[in-house]
Image (cartoon, rainbow, N blue to C red):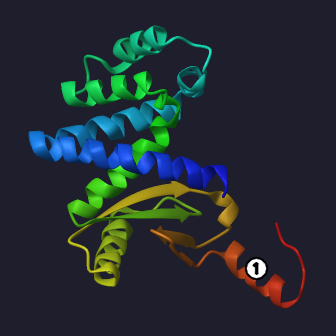
Amino acid sequence: MSSNNVVIKIAQPYAVALLDLAKTKKVTEKVSQDIQSIQNILAQSDKLKIFLANPLKTVEAKKEVIIATVGDQINENTLSFLMILVDRKRIGMLDAIASKYLELAYQMESLTIANINTSIALSPDQETLLTEKIKVMTKAKEVKLIISVEPELIGGFTIQIGSKVIDTSIRGQLRQMASHLDVVVT
């Protein structure tokens, strides 16, 4: 079993517990916003990620950093949850737990997340059209696009919805052609 699978298996119950707490307290939307904000902060700060994952840092130090970083910006339930993660030495898995929580929360809301990689930025009209097409494909009430521009795709785009990937990029087509010719393309 790969370490990524282990992390996912550990993250799942924590994400479910947070979602259950949020539903019980009727603060699901606020907690989801908090978790999204925390994920954004983690994405921007490798130092914070490394600090939280460092087993040599004390529980108190980690709690102080969390409170100083997001304490006044997040719901008390979210903050309590983060403190529990610190106490149980799972705060280093916060990113995985946050991702799993958002996935579960979006499923609950019948919201589909579509990761879009494009070679160039999409116009608002293209985003709207793509959203509508994905709604039809997935039969979802709502679709959230997470768009990133990757010039190395050369042209076209890729869509990932859950484990399904649709690759219309030129890079993908070149790879497909290369596989038929038994050539390696990077």
Picture quadrant of residue 1: bottom right
**Residue at (59%, 63%) from the top-left corner?**
119
Q: Is residue 185 visible?
A: yes
Q: Is residue 29 visible?
A: no
Q: Residues within 10 Å of mark 1 (few under 14, many from 20)?
A: some
Q: For numbered disc 1, what is the local secondary structure? A: helix
Front in this rendered view, residue 53 or 137: 53
**Residue at (27%, 25%) from the top-left corner?**
80
* Image location of residue 6, percent across then percent down: 57, 50
Q: Which kind of residue does numbered mark 1 sit on? A: Leu
**Residue at (82%, 90%) from the top-left corner?**
180
* Image location of residue 53, percent across then percent down: 57, 26
In the rendered image, which quarter contains the C terminus?
bottom right
Does residue 88 appear to the left or right of 143 in the view shown? right
Q: Which residue is mark 1?
A: 174
Front in this rendered view, residue 46 or 62: 62
Does residue 172 appear to the left or right of 162 in the view shown? right
Picture quadrant of residue 128: bottom left
